[in-house]
Image (cartoon, grey):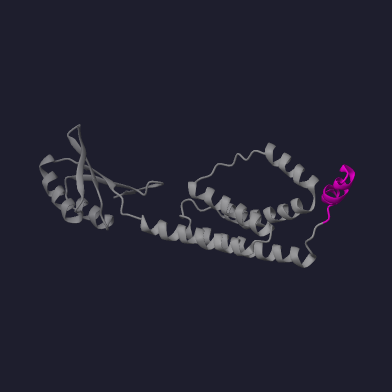
Amino acid sequence: MEKITDIVNKYIEPTLTGETSLTSLDIVAVFVITLLLGLYIFMIYKHHAKSEFYSKDFNITLPALTVITACIMIAMQANLLVSLGMIGSLSIVRFRTAVKSPIDLLYLFWAIAVGIISGVGLYSLAVLLCLAVTLILYELGYAYEINTSSLLFINISRQEDIKQVEKIIKKSSKKNELASMTAKDGEFQYVYELTSSDFNALANELTSIKSVKSVNIISHTGERRTQRKK
């Protein structure tokens, strides 16, 4: 049986010296491949992220995070002390930057995962991961992109003209429903929930009625709201 000192010298001591089995060429390969995959994530985020949530600083962080994670993995393979120190330091670090969109969390984990996988030399798995995530983002993202309902606010001074208003709404939108009606100081406000492919034309046609004082259209995609006022 091997003595404890022999086991320490044979298995544990090499991990404390900082030596690594990776050659300089292997390390350069990790850097290059990880950087290319990080830039790929950068381009996907730039193209796929919605304009109202896009952050250039966040996007620059993704390839940098990928490369940094790969470097950490190389260092952890080479030195046990670095591994223990890294675990301890990361366990006390707290990140308080708010994530604007839930999809940003996916990009963060994607960048970290690519860095970890590339750092241990599993390049094929890293490439497959990138392809799989890209497929999920685009196929599922476009498959569930639907024309969501919008809210139409109409202020009108003559209640008798509401029939003409409803006629225009029904012509512009097959799906429409009166949500509420409010009367105040001789004016009436009607709120309709509807879908339409051309809100500008609808607003122009409604404002052509003399008794219509204002038209507000609030549309949303579930994550943002934009208001059009005519």
All told, the count of numbered labels is: 0
The outermost residue toward the top is 185
- Reply above or below: 201 against 212: below
103 relative to 156 in the view: left or right: right
Question: Residue 200 placed where, x, y %?
Answer: 28, 56
From the image, give the main secondary structure of the stretch colored magenta: helix
Q: Residue at x 62, y 40 (%)?
A: 95
- Reply above or below: 214 against 39: above
Q: Nearer the viewer, residue 1 or 209?
A: 1
Question: Residue 142 placed where, x, y %?
Answer: 39, 59
20 relative to 133 in the view: left or right: right
Q: Quadrant of residue 177?
A: top left
Q: Quadrant of residue 60?
A: bottom right
State which region is magenta: 1-19
The outermost residue toward the front is 1
- Residue 111 visible in the displayed image: yes
22 relative to 53 in the view: left or right: right
Q: Nearer the viewer, residue 132 or 151?
A: 132
- Residue 216 visible in the displayed image: no
Q: Nearer the viewer, residue 140 or 1?
A: 1
Q: Residue at x 49, y 61 (%)?
A: 134
Q: Residue at x 46, y 58 (%)?
A: 136
Question: Residue 78 placed where, x, y %?
Answer: 79, 53
Q: Residue at x 72, y 52 (%)?
A: 72
Query: Would you say residue 194 sits in the magenta stretch?
Result: no
- Reply above or below: 131 against 195: below
